[in-house]
Image: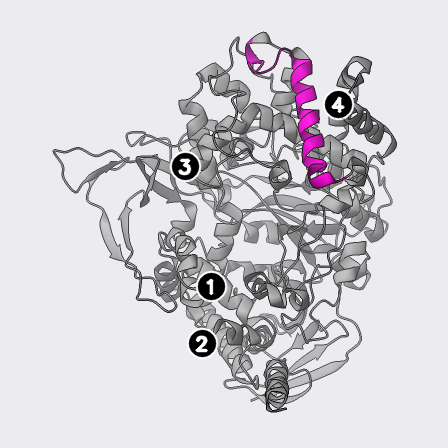
Amino acid sequence: MTLLALLVLAAVAAWLFLRGSLAMLDGEHRGAGLSAKVMVERDAQGIPLISGGSREDVAYATGFVHGQDRFFQMDLLRRVGGGELAELFGAKALPVDKSRRLHRFRARAEQALAAMPVEEKRLLERYAAGVNDGLNALSARPFEYGVVGAAPRAWRPADSLLVVWAMYFDLQGMQEPRELARGWFRDHSTAAQLAFLLPESTEWDAPLDAASIPAPPAPIPEQAPSWWGKPRTGKPAKLAMVDFADSVGSNNWAVGGSRSTDGAAIVADDMHLGIQLPNTWYRVALRFPDASGAMRRVAGVTLPGAPPLVVVGSNGKVAWGFTNSYGDYLDLVEIATDPARPGQVRTPAGWETPVLYDEPILVKGEAAHKFVVRATSSGPLREVGGRTYAIHWIAHAPGAVNLNPRKLETVNALDEALAAAATVGIPAQNFVAGDDKGNIGWTIAGLMAQRAQPGLASTFPMAANAASAGWQGPLEPASYPVLRNPASGQLSTANSRPLGGVGAQVIGDGGFDIGARNRQVRDALAALGDKADVAGVYGVAMDDRALFIAPWRERALKVLDSAALEGKPQRAEFRRLLQESWTGRASVDSVGYRLARHFMWGLHEVLYDGANSELAALDEKATAASASTRWPAVVARLLDEQPAGWLPSAHRSWRDMQLAAVDKAVADLTEGGKRLADASWGERNKAAIVHPIGNALPVLKRWLSAPADMLPGDSNMPRVAGAKFGQSQRMTVSPGREEQGVFNMPGGQSGHPLSPFFLNGHEDWVKGKATPFLPGAVRHTLVLVP
């Protein structure tokens, strides 16, 4: 009986602790430093309309709701940016912390904050005050800290800049392993082989300034590199682990007033990111007076912890959205040494002595880990594969993070928005915007690199004496490429090469997508005709047609002829399912789609697996697919032309090689006695959207996860969807007509599993339901008073 009573008391205590960390939704709270009251009015989904008499008061209130709903998420982001995760999670987080601490972004954040204009610094200070007041107003610390056994640390103004640097890691962090992979390709291939294997464009490209890129393909050399088609050393890779390896993020598009039903532009955006709970974004509508005293309403999403600004959305005059630009913003510079110059290294600037910075890393339950950063004029030093590289990254430059995105809140026309976009300090993005007069335009928003010799050569590791090859400093905003009001009446970007001409060299290729997704977006927009509306423009985001995978299905069907099927019942079943269970889409019930996609990746394994084994020794994220997303076009061309010198020695013919890929797919999908007929795309593409605490403690995973929904969509189509990666939000809005706009996202406003807003809206996202862009009827009112 005593034990039972103790268990009941423990359960009650746990329940009360959890309840105590729920956000305040109604009532009144005194906020330090407010100049006047601020209204926080939430709708049934917990989306707040925050109204105040000054921008600073609204920043405070934004911090208050972020601190109450999302503090642990914010804490993780600043720790990712600063390399401070081990303080919460122990030594297992040290490898990540060391890779982050190398860049010393906390020190850079403090320097950037000190250099800010007083008004901008004040905005961050008021946001931090709101975060801390929101945190302290909870009856108990956020539940996550009870699980990890730690106390939350107060928010500081510089922390908000660290959150933006965390996004640099997320959005540009693949450039370093990509350069390592491309360097390995260069070191193990002839110049002719390299030009063929790493093309600058393919027939899939759909640039903004042309129908295609008419670049002649490089000839196929007579012989393949020695590593080509060799098997992996060690344990074979499992295709189920790599068949979403080409995940790249985000679509956005705009239709001009010449083609919309009411003459205003229509802007759509769906940013693709890793998806967990709570969702990356926090929805808001903000009301505050602008410089003239007129009240402005800005609606969209904020990033909790980042400066309290709307990331993408609409201000009533202009709407805008982002996709990651994948330009070339990082150089790996190989460092030379000389025994005659002890302690010195050679960089493009000449011989120099690295500056040493002590960066002790706090580790939960252990002594601080000693870590020393060696920094040069070309960046911090890293040892890889017996070589030393300096990481010369635009994220280190002054201005990499600033508060200029605030300008977008009050621009009144497209040209103002384009000019503002070129000044903002964020990871460089494709910026697509439209105004209430029907104008649409594109540019790059965020810091770009000025290169003396732009182009493909800069995407390989540099030699220490290649002084003119790297980036020389930030590009001047006046030199940013810009497009306005194209004759087609539409613009679209989807992480692929955005321009076909000189502008492409200015941006550089830092890992462009192959282009199939943007081509599908472009053509779907064109099909809307001259009377496009919000519903039609939003519908493009739901397009899961399998245009990219369809040719691979045809190749598999062609090779599975009667001779290939003789005595091979599993091959016959594979062919039958390719024919009968093919919907032409990445639909959850399609077995044919999954088989065709698996066949394509099986060919990748046959041809590149040995190289991937070597690349993994350099960096776990360095792969042949990271070296070039255009590898499917390379493989398709080989299958079409079938050059003898490129046939792997393990296969008698190109036909046998393709059949081996089919057999590999069959073996993978029937492992453990599974039936091939049950291998639907939905069985593979199940959502695994979990709170980080749920991943750390499986016993809690049930209560900290979204349902394991089967998701239609895939990577090379507009509706990008994977188990843990995909459309982190969907927005379609016409500026000045926000009431007609639509929006959904995979998680709710709160990070607390007992909140009614934890998963509110998730089902709408799964089904693609177009829910309202603006907050709905007021259900809860919190008044913050001085």
Q: Position of residue 40 (x, y in %)?
A: 67, 79
Tag 3: residue type? Leu
Q: Position of residue 587 (x, y in %)?
A: 81, 42
Q: Give the residues drawn in magenta, as a range.
A: 645-674
Q: Is residue 499 above or below residue 654?
A: below
Residue toward you, 709 or 526: 709
- Is most of the magenta stretch helix, strand or loop? helix
Tag 1: residue type? Arg
Viewer-nearest of discs 1 and 4:
4
Q: Is residue 665 magenta?
A: yes
Res 259 quadrant in image:
top right
In the rendered image, the residue lying farthest to the left is 340
> What element does badge 4 sit on?
helix
Q: Between disc 3 and disc 2, whose residue precedes?
A: 2
Viewer-nearest of discs 3 and 2:
3
> How much space separates mark 4 and mark 3, taking CA atoms?
34 Å
Q: For mark 1, what is the residue?
A: 78
Viewer-nearest of discs 3 and 1:
3
> How much space separates mark 1 and mark 4, taking CA atoms?
47 Å
Q: Is residue 420 above or below residue 211?
A: below
Q: For mark 2, what is the residue?
A: 154
